[in-house]
Image (cartoon, rainbow, N blue to C red):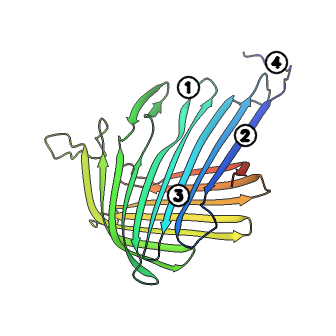
Amino acid sequence: MRTLHYAVKPVIICIISIQCILIAEEGEETEYGWENQVVGSFNLTQAQFDNWTQGGENTLAWQLNVNSSFAYEQEDFSWTNTGKVSYGQTKIGDLSSRKSADEIRIESVYLRKLGDYVNPYVSALLQTQLTKGYQYVEDERFPISNLFDPGYITLSAGVGYEPVPYLKTRLGAATKTTITREYAVGLTDDPESDRIEKIDTEFGALSVTELRKPLAENILLTSTLELFSNLESFEQVDVRWDTIISAKVTRYIDVSLNIELLYDSDISPKRQLKQLLAMGLSYSFL
């Protein structure tokens, strides 16, 4: 029978979150021209237990996020480029380190201003991950994804609508191309084909709605809903809903809640859900 030792030692728990905000501007603020922003954050959580009678596992988790926006505004057109890189790992007890976040997302949208509210646009979106992903079964792990395996390229053209400054939406025809290398089964490969297909292109419609609205003087809500359908059935609608609520508690302390919902029947028959709550330090260089 296992013996408990009651020589209790302190528990070491450390949570660090650092956010850096870089805003590049040239001269005074103007109505037209470039408006660039780069936001970086690093979160670190660590817990260590030694003879802790209440139980617990040693934990080390970290995550790095970089979000950028480069927007060029003119009287007759606008060109917006956004990027997101996110990567993190978690280690619990004697288990090996495992990924907790891994995403690369780059989008470019060109919009021609013909009217006050409705205007034509073209867009390109690239999504993939940085490193190899694994599925864990007991003490074994099996690779299931990698850089550009899969990768997603979505091209779209249509019309955009902006009824109010904090809400804009666009709807258009689109192509969604899925690229794979080693893990084609279940993503791009057609079981009725005699050869392994590593590229699959779907034609359909894309809807993107973006909300960016202050809820209070120090609280900001940003939410993006993306819907893609190959128009074959209502059950085959890919959904990505990413919502962030960020609050500036003091000049140097921020709190944010991020909830991301994904559904793609080609990847999983069930919806995927991710939630991240972070509190840490922030600093504006300009």
Task: Give amino acid for label 3.
Answer: Ser
Residue located beneath label 1 in the image? 96
Judged by depth in the image, the label closer to the viewer, 2 or 4, is 2
The residue type indicated by label 4 comes to His
Residue depth check, mark 4 versus mark 3: number of the one nearer the observer:
3
At label 1, the amino acid type is Ser
Give how far apart the Cα atoms at labels 2 and 3 are: 26 Å
Quarter occupied by residue 131: top left
The picture places residue 136, in percent across and down from the top left corner, at 47, 32
Binning the other alpha carbons within 10 Å of mark 3 as few (below 14), some (14 to 19) or many (20 upward) gives: some
Identify the residue at the far bottom of this view: 116
Q: Which of the 4 image quadrants contains residue 28?
A: bottom right
User: Mark 2, mark 3: which one is toward the viewer?
Assistant: 3
Q: Distance between the residues labelled 2 and 4?
A: 31 Å
Q: Which amino acid does label 2 sit on?
A: Ile
| Disc number placed over residue 67 in the picture, else none | none
Q: Can you identify the residue that label 3 sits on? A: 69
- In the image, taking residue 75 as reference, residue 188 lies left or right, namely left
Q: Tell me where residue 23 appears, x and y as whole percent.
A: 62, 56
Instruction: From the top left corner, tell me how far across and down residue 192 is, in percent.
Output: 16, 47
Q: Name the residue under label 2.
A: 16
